[in-house]
Image (tube, rainbow, N blue to C red):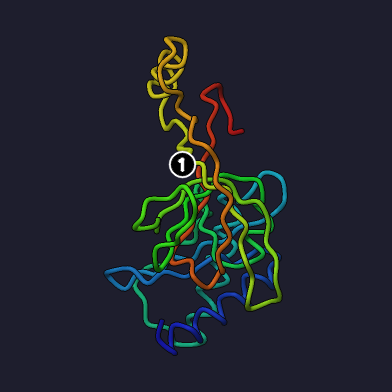
Amino acid sequence: MTARTMDLSEAIAHTVEGMGYEFVELERLPGSMLRVTIDTEQEGGISVNDCEAVSNQLTALFAAEDVDYKRLEVTSPGVERPLKKAKDWIRFAGSLAHVELFAPMFAEGFPEAGRRKLDGRILSVSGEPGSEQIQFEFTGEKPFRTPSQAFRGRLEARKGGRSHEQAAPITVEFPLSEVEHAHLIAELDFKGGRK
């Protein structure tokens, strides 16, 4: 991230948080497009009206600061929300997540080469600010993405085949600073809601 992007990111965070929302991330996309992702802990999440209000405020900020861009998109993080800061990991403890580390980690039960990508549950966060450790239960658990996958998984389990979520859990710990990318994994029940 360039110094200019960091300054812009800080200005956006200050504005968004001043409006009572959480600033998740700023992305610079092709075609001079800026995407700002916001969130809230309030029930109901981010609405179209919230995005519009933040967009209007940021447009005024960009005009005052002479920010060069062609298009601005303000959005919610969605069900597969990125996990960027320690407070995100704390907030979503107990949730399923996909984690990609900068380097493979080694643990009993992992292949000799280690694992760089982990799917499992966030257990907890410990440590001082700047040196947080993530406790994570690697399960290899990948929830069903479609109703047909869920149906096939239930059929397989009934026939005595290998269950969709049968991997033996392995508890691991890694520094937050070693996380290259992480996001929540949506847990859908296919009966009109999320778990």
Give the tally of numbered discs.
1
Q: Residues within 10 Å of mark 1 (few under 14, many from 20)?
A: some
User: In terms of depth relative to the viewer, which is nearer, 43 or 69?
Assistant: 43
Q: Looking at the picture, how far across and down is residue 51, in whole percent?
A: 55, 57
Q: Residue furthest left?
A: 31
Q: Nearer the viewer, residue 43 or 142?
A: 142
Which image quadrant is residue 18 in? bottom right
Which of the two residues, 102 or 13, is positioned nearer the viewer here? 102
Q: Is residue 189 above or below residue 1?
A: above
Q: Quadrant of residue 172?
A: bottom right
Tell me which residue sits at (51%, 62%) in the image.
37
Q: Position of residue 54 (x, y in %)?
A: 58, 65
Q: Is residue 87 left or right of residue 66?
A: right
Q: Which residue is mark 1?
A: 140
Q: Secondary structure at mark 1?
A: loop
Quarter of the image containing the N terminus?
Answer: bottom left
Q: Quadrant of the C terminus?
A: top right
Q: Position of residue 41 (x, y in %)?
A: 70, 54
Residue, x 36% and y 76% (percent of image)? 69
Amino acid type at image mark 1: Gly
Q: Is residue 194 above or below residue 185?
A: above
Q: Is residue 130 left or right of residue 158?
A: right
* Residue under the image location 38 percent in, 18 percent down: 152
Image location of residue 80, percent across then percent down:
49, 48
Q: Residue drawn 61% across and 57% down? A: 39
